[in-house]
Image (cartoon, rainbow, N blue to C red):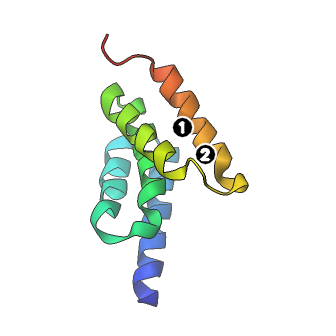
Amino acid sequence: MRRDRRKHHLRFELGRLLIEREDWLEAERVFRSFYQYDFVYTTQALFYLGQVYEALGRREAAAEHYARFTAWWEYADPELQPWVEEAREALVRLGPLDQ
């Protein structure tokens, strides 16, 4: 079990590094892999997938992921609220999706 956590953490950090490098497609692949395997990172992966899809110009997918993230972390601890606020700002930035 401990080895799995370490593996998931390393994969998560790899995804963050890929975003820094703006390697959006590889970052998407890494963060999508958390849906089935590790619920510890799933919510954070939603946030990063929102960033990935926004960078790729996939507004609907970005908004969907940001919205799910904010719903799950709406009442998160105060130190996590900057993430929630950033996701909310992204939703405003993306604007109405029916355009």
Question: Which amino acid, mark 1?
Answer: Ala
Residue depicted at x 60% and y 37%? 86
Q: Nearer the viewer, residue 75 or 60?
A: 75
Residue 23 horizontal side relative to residue 73, left or right? left
Instruction: Determine contact: label 2, label 1, CB under 8 Å.
Output: yes
Residue 9 in the image, given as x and y percentages of width and height: 48, 71
Residue 19 in the image, given as x and y percentages of width and height? 47, 46
In the rendered structure, the answer to whether residue 89 lies left or right of residue 37 reads right
In the image, what residue occupies the spot 51% across and 21% down? 93
Q: Is residue 65 above or below residue 2?
A: above
The type of residue carrying mark 2 is Trp
- Real-space Cα distance between discs 2 and 1? 6 Å
Looking at the picture, how far across and down is residue 21, in whole percent?
48, 45
Secondary structure, mark 1, is helix
Q: Secondary structure at mark 2?
A: helix
Query: Which residue is depicted at the point 41% across and 60% down?
Result: 42
Which residue carries the number 1 mark? 87
Where the N terminus falls, by quadrant? bottom left
Is there any visible trace of residue 39 in the rendered image? yes
The residue at which mark 2 appears reads as 83
